[in-house]
Image (spheres, rainbow, N blue to C red):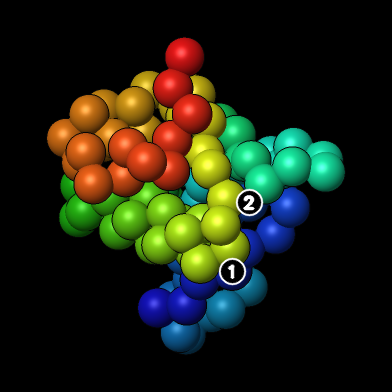
Amino acid sequence: MQQRLTTDSFNLLTTKDALTPIAHLGIKKIPAKKIYLLEYTWVSFPKRHQGLAEQLITAFMQEMKLQGCQVLPLCPYAKKYFAQHPEFNHQLIIK
């Protein structure tokens, strides 16, 4: 699987079709800051319940660590995920 980060999304792609995401995070970068809003999580219907959302958020947080960015989770699934994964607390902006 491949990953692709843009200014408004973080996608998980299959190696067969590198254009169509099988899982997707809706994100927004705050201009002039190293902060991303994590707005929603989406997984294609046939791929649901296979752990892809968790893999996607984990990969996204690893990328944010490499870039020295923080994340403000707005997505209910992401909030639940972070409650179970305190290893990412130092990267989060929690309100």
User: Helix, strand, or loop for circle 1?
Assistant: strand
Q: Quadrant of residue 23?
A: bottom left
Q: Is residue 44 visible?
A: yes
Q: Quadrant of residue 80?
A: top left
* Residue 10 x/y as whole percent: 56, 56
Mark 1 surroundings within 10 Å by alpha-carbon count, few (fewer than 14), some (14 through 19), many (20 or more): some
Task: Indicate the amino acid at tag 2.
Answer: Ser
The residue at the point 20 percent across, 55 percent down is: 50
Whether residue 3 sits left or right of residue 62 in the image: it is right
Residue 9: give its label.
2
Whether residue 25 sits left or right of residue 5 in the image: it is left
Mark 2 surroundings within 10 Å by alpha-carbon count, few (fewer than 14), some (14 through 19), many (20 or more): some
For mark 1, what is the residue?
Answer: 4
Asked if residue 76 is positioned above or below residue 85 in the image, the reply reads above
* Residue 61 x/y as whole percent: 42, 54
Asked if labels 1 and 2 touch by Cβ distance under 8 angstroms, the answer is: yes
Task: Indicate the amino acid at tag 1.
Answer: Arg
* Residue 78 x/y as whole percent: 36, 34
* Residue 85 x/y as whole percent: 20, 41
Compare residues 13 and 66 and report the one nearer the observer. 66
Mark 2 → mark 1, Cα distance in angstroms = 8 Å
Report the residue that reaches farthest toward the top.
Answer: 95
Report the residue that reaches farthest toward the bottom.
Answer: 16
